[in-house]
């Protein structure tokens, strides 16, 4: 969730931007006359095979994310008016939706996306872009105020990264960063009954998170190499493998993600995550 994409921290991504970001020019894939669903599992929640394209494809070789079963997306206001039913048939089995950043900004599309994703049968969760110049308690309270407590939702996400576009120019110590994150995550876990997921990017991770928060699930951005190469030794639940995805149901680019495991692992993880 980079910046200009608020879920990556590198000012080069598109999926989760802060309000200062400008939307990119629309780039859409060729549209067939009919949309054919590609279900791969009729038990429990239906899993759709991925049909995403990529404006800047990467050859990951034998460790390609396309070999994994359960794909999804992350979105914010910059994806505009999403056709969630169509997006689901293209392989969006889950979606993380930008909810808040800092202590006073609500993504203007959050409530619409939150409702429509569920109506389309997409497993969805909300994420918060952490702002280092506000207290962790204020930010947790703002997130809780705006994100409903839905037992069917995915665990909430804290997005921590560097953002060169931010008005907050301070660089906190590693110890202070970890302290603020813990306060925020503790409040969310107490309220939602689910352990939050940590989303991060390589530079922020190496400076602050390597070896930390071993009991928390991680969502890792790695758009050129497998996470095992970028984050050695770190276990992960989600991998954001592209910031330049193309799909029906959305105009322009979208972030692409994948779950670490099989379809069976996915259903088991959902049950364990609450």
Image (spheres, rainbow, N blue to C red):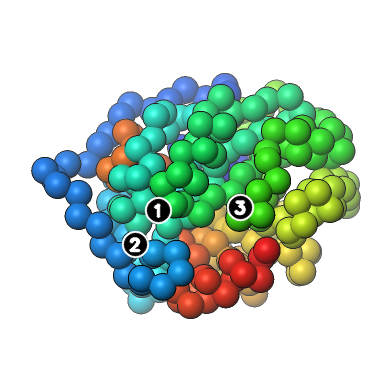
Identify which residue, 44 or 242, lies in the foreground.
44
Q: Is residue 109 left or right of residue 92?
A: right
- At x 46%, y 52%, the residue is 122
User: What whole-number distance in Å separates the C-alpha atoms at marks 3 and 1?
Assistant: 15 Å
Q: Nearer the viewer, residue 193 or 11?
A: 193
- Decide if residue 71 is on the left or right side of residue 178: left
Circle 2 Cα neighbour tier, 10 Å, few/some/many (<14 / 14–19 / ≥20): many
Of the two numbered discs 3 and 1 on the same chain, state the one appearing first in sequence. 1
- Cβ atoms under marks 2 and 3 closer than 8 Å: no
Determine which residue is flagged by label 3: 153
Q: Position of residue 270 (x, y in %)?
A: 59, 66
Image position of 114 with respect to 63: above or below: above
| Quarter occupied by the C terminus | bottom right
Q: Which residue in the structure is indicated by mark 1? A: 92
Could you tell me if residue 133 is visible in this image?
yes
Q: Nearer the viewer, residue 241 or 125?
A: 125
- Labels 3, 1: front one: 3
Residue drawn at (52%, 25%), measured in percent from left and top?
21
Describe residue 163's horizontal placement relative to residue 261 as left or right.
right
Along the line of sight, the residue nearer the viewer: 213 or 85:
85
Task: Give residue 169's position: percent from left, percent from top.
Answer: 74, 29
Q: Residue at x 31, y 45 (%)?
A: 86
Q: Compare marks 1 and 2 and give the one earlier in the sequence.
A: 2
Q: Which badge, 2 or 3, comes first in the chain's sequence?
A: 2
């Amino acid at each position: 969730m980079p910046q200009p994409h608020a879920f990556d921290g590198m000012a080069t991504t598109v999926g989760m931007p802060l309000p200062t970001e400008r939307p990119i020019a629309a780039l859409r894939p060729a549209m067939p006359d009919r949309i054919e669903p590609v279900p791969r599992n009729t038990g429990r929640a239906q899993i759709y095979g991925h049909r995403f394209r990529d404006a800047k494809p990467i050859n990951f070789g034998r460790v390609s994310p396309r070999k994994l079963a359960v794909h999804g997306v992350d979105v914010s206001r910059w994806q505009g008016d999403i056709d969630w039913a169509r997006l689901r048939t293209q392989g969006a089995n889950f979606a993380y939706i930008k909810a808040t950043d800092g202590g006073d900004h609500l993504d203007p599309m959050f409530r619409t996306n939150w409702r429509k994703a569920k109506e389309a049968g997409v497993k969805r969760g909300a994420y918060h872009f952490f702002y280092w110049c506000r207290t962790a308690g204020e930010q947790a309270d703002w997130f809780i105020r705006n994100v409903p407590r839905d037992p069917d939702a995915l665990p909430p996400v804290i997005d921590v990264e560097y953002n060169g576009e931010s008005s907050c120019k301070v660089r906190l110590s590693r110890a202070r960063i970890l302290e603020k994150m813990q306060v925020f995550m503790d409040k969310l876990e107490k309220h939602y009954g689910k352990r939050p997921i940590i989303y991060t990017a390589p530079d922020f991770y190496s400076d602050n998170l390597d070896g930390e928060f071993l009991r928390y699930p991680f969502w890792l951005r790695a758009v050129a190499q497998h996470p095992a190469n970028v984050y050695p030794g770190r276990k992960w639940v989600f991998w954001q493998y592209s910031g330049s995805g193309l799909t029906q149901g959305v105009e322009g680019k979208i972030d692409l993600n994948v779950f670490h495991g099989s379809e069976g692992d996915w259903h088991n993880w959902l049950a364990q995550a609450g």
